[in-house]
Amino acid sequence: MPSSISQFRRSELFKPAIIVPIVIMLFFSIFNLTAPSDPARITYAFELGVVNKDIGPSLPLVSNQAIKTLSKSLPFRLTIIKDSATAREALSRGEIASVITFPENFSQLALSDEKLNIEILNSQHLTISETQISSQLPGTIQMALSSFIANLRLAKSNNQVPVSGMLINTNIETLYSAKSLASVPSPFVMSFTSWLASMVGSILLFLATKQMPLLNRAYLRTVIPIMVMGSASLVLAIVITLTTLQWESFLMAWLSVWLVSVCLSWLFLGVFEIIGLAALLIILPVVQYQSVLSGSMMPISAAPEWLELIGNSVPFDAIGGAYRAVIFGSDGNLPFTWLLGAALIGLFLSWGSAIFKGRMKRTWK
């Protein structure tokens, strides 16, 4: 229907409907993939304050040996602070992320058979990464110091020098390795932009074609998403390829995002046709929660219970799993049955509504 395309081109929303989905995939991917987070740098940036009140009686102090052990076994930076008040002020200002305090009788109790108590001071007003690390810190420190004290007491009972260093060597094998830092967030970027660009593009296309003849707008709402999402997903695939340097993933990244985006666009447009933009009350939350529902940022089982229930009912995470398979070469396929069902429902609503309303108009005439 060439006349439909010409009429669409005259709409004020023609350019936004074409350009905005491409811009979303372009800028969202650039901003997220050109500055990916480095877990090693994040961990090393965590600064642990240490207040040592230990007064002996042993020399060297057992607490000093424990601090050396922590500095070797933990991937954090350790900073010695003279007293608890200074440590609290430093934590309040964000100069350190957590504080561990050794009591005055630490050496005395370490050489006895009694349990030891240490104080750990955390705060949740810091950055997200610091708050997450500090919440896991007590268990990590407890395990490290318990091993140290157990080794110290065993050596004392046998009149031997405590063994220093790690007693266990680990041989690490990574099944699927990220070829670059940008590879890790790529599946999330692919998933979130698929949903966001589809939603925004559908809104603009719906508004741009709302005043057109019924069959013409059904035709445009079928054809335009194929072209627009094809271009947008191509741009996204190019950015992903350039930032991850995974040239072998280019074609599948493009085609998989293209397919998902087109199916979602058809579904959204069909729903908009029936109930209008009020559908955003449902669609918008689903899109915004894709960071959780897609399984890209965290497992579904780690989500709040009500989101986990939704995620277990509808396989949103299958899309995220398929995107991970594209980037890492792991196992995972797109949920073709669900995508086909979504596409057919959307097309049925768009075309069915156009045909039904057209017949109703002829009947009333």
Image (cartoon, grey):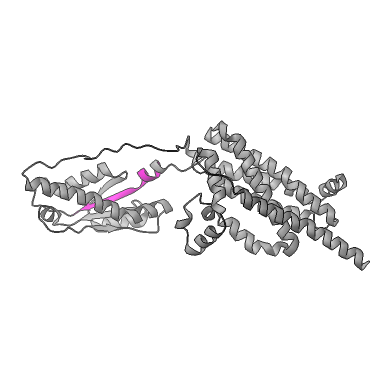
> Residue 214 falls in which quadrant of the image?
bottom right
Q: Which residues are magenta?
A: 41-52
Residue 66 x %, y %: 19, 47
Whether residue 44 appears in magenta in the rendering, the answer is yes
Question: Is 85 rendered above or below residue 23?
Answer: below
Residue at far right of view: 365
Instruction: Name the foreground residue: 23 vs 192.
Output: 192
Residue 228 x %, y %: 71, 44
Question: Is 135 rendered above or below residue 21?
Answer: below
- Residue drawn at (47%, 62%) of the image: 304
Question: Is 8 rendered above or below residue 357?
Answer: above
Residue at far bottom of view: 364
Whether residue 112 appears in magenta in the rendering, the answer is no
Residue 70 x %, y %: 24, 46
Residue at far left of view: 159
Tell me if residue 198 can be seen: yes
Residue 151 x %, y %: 15, 46
For the image, the number of numbered tags is 0
Relative horizontal placement of residue 43, taking residue 337 as reference (left or right): left
Tell me if residue 196 can be seen: no
Relative horizontal placement of residue 151, taking residue 128 as reference (left or right): left
Relative horizontal placement of residue 230, taking residue 330 as reference (left or right): right
- Residue drawn at (35%, 51%) of the image: 95
Q: Where the C terminus falls, by quadrant?
A: bottom right
Relative horizontal placement of residue 115, taking residue 46 as reference (left or right): left
Residue at far front of view: 337
- Residue drawn at (24%, 40%) of the image: 168
Instruction: Name the foreground residue: 88 vs 336.
Output: 336
